[in-house]
Amino acid sequence: MPRTPGYPGRVVPVILGMPTVRRSGPPAAPADRPEDPRLLDRFGRVATDLRVSLTDRCNLRCSYCMPPEGLPWLAGDEVLTDAEVVRLVTVAVEHLGVTRVRLTGGEPLLRRGLEAIVRGVKTSRTARGMAPDVALTTNGIGLEHRARSLAEAGLDRVNVSLDSLDRARFARITLRDRLPDVLAGLRAAVAAGLAPVKINAVLLRGVNDDEAVPLLRWALRNGYRLRFIEQMPLEPHGTWRRSDLVTAREILDLLSTEFGLVPVHSSVRGAAPAETWLVERPDGVGGRAEVGIVAAVTRPFCGDCDRTRLTADGQIRTCLFARTETDLRSLLRAGASDAELAETWRVAMWGKQAGHGIGEASFLRPERPMSAIGG
Ligand code: SAM
Ligand code: SF4
């Protein structure tokens, strides 16, 4: 497939959300930014959670994420090397106050050096002398063979995405007949001690919205923590319609037909985007069971957002829906110091928008689809 050189939304670097010319040093700090080493923005938020996309490629073709034919992939030399990823994440942890790191993609298990990346990131130290918490979001294919080595490398937790327990339906949604591999990966993750294993599920109207209850029943039986994610306008063909969305309200109504749900107060769950409910099990078996819903569209949590993002090609994004990016890779490859990289990151985050604006007349989708940003 022919490759398009970079994505149209990229600018180098971004200052106050405006494109500027390429330069060799870090941008000057905006006059209204207080002197503070952390990743602050103008709305009082502090980013401590870093999402790192390790590749834009994937071995599935989930209909809401990637077209059947794939996408114009990044070229090999555009993608950060393992050592570059570790260097930038270490800057975020040791200079910028990041305490949690999530490795994602595309499909991160396609990175042969994933264990080395995890090991490298785990050697970084926060201001309190702690290693960051490192988690992985994956479709689970191949996890069966790598869960143990990843746990040994220091991986703390894993989220596995799974939208259907029906093999034919799974194949219809993802265009690949790989459900048995995902289930084997889940079992291996538990055996390797990567618990609690979380499951991410996207419900699609008329496709798998009848699986809300069966998915939760199955998750409870197996000790997995299930989170439903509202479908966001990040699919590549621009077919998303708000009216098609299976909303958090609908999901709650579906679950309530079978389960008692007690909301967990936000002061307990913190900045985590998933609203959470304790589930009273119909079988009466004890133990903590919960279900989450990431209602990014109908109940946006932008005011509490604590995230910053790094794409596989080394671009900082302040938000999934940001329309601009800041190029750290060029600075890194031009020999920038840790202090320069950190300052560039601070300036980028100061320009973070207040919210994603889905539903507003001015809303524009980001140029990159979800798989190229890092979900
Ligand atoms: N390949 C890995 C996986 O599927 O877990 C990691 C990357 S994937 C982009 C991360 C998460 O984003 C998955 O749970 C997936 O279901 C979710 N996702 C992808 N496209 C989405 C969309 N348009 N709306 C909501 N969630 C989406
Ligand atoms: Fe691949 Fe994950 Fe996107 Fe599915 S959601 S196509 S597994 S990147």
Image (cartoon, rainbow, N blue to C red):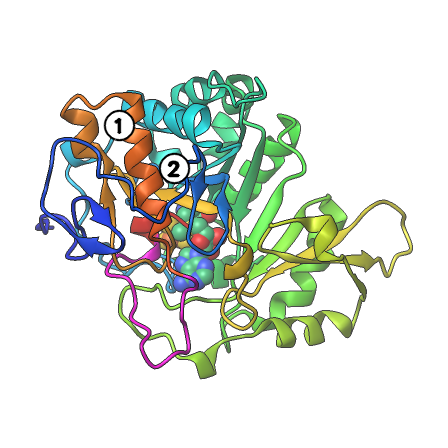
Q: How many labels does the image show?
A: 2
Asked if residue 76 can be seen in this view, the reply is: no
Q: Does the residue labelled 2 lie within 8 Å of ligand 1?
A: yes
Element at label 1: helix
Is 136 above or below relative to 241? above
* Rendering coords of residue 40 (x, y %): 44, 44
Q: Give the range drawn in magenta.
A: 354-370
Name the residue that disc number 2 marks.
Answer: 108
> Are dots 2 and 1 in contact, CB under 8 Å?
no
Is 223 above or below relative to 213? above
**Residue 363 belongs to magenta span:** yes
Q: Distance between the residues labelled 2 and 1?
A: 28 Å
* Rendering coords of residue 54 (x, y %): 34, 36
- Disc 2 marks which amino acid? Pro
Q: Quadrant of residue 33?
A: top left
Q: Which residue lies furthest to the front in this view?
A: 31
**Residue 107 belongs to magenta span:** no
Name the residue that disc number 1 marks.
Answer: 340
* Rendering coords of residue 64 (x, y %): 38, 64
Quarter holding ligand 1: bottom left
| Label 2 vs label 1, nearer the camera | 1
Within 10 angstroms of label 1, few (less than 14), some, or many (20 or more) residues? Answer: some
Whether residue 179 sits left or right of residue 174 in the image: it is: right
Asked if residue 47 can be seen in this view, the reply is: yes
Q: Residue at x 62, y 25 (%)?
A: 192
Whether residue 265 sits left or right of residue 161 in the image: it is: right
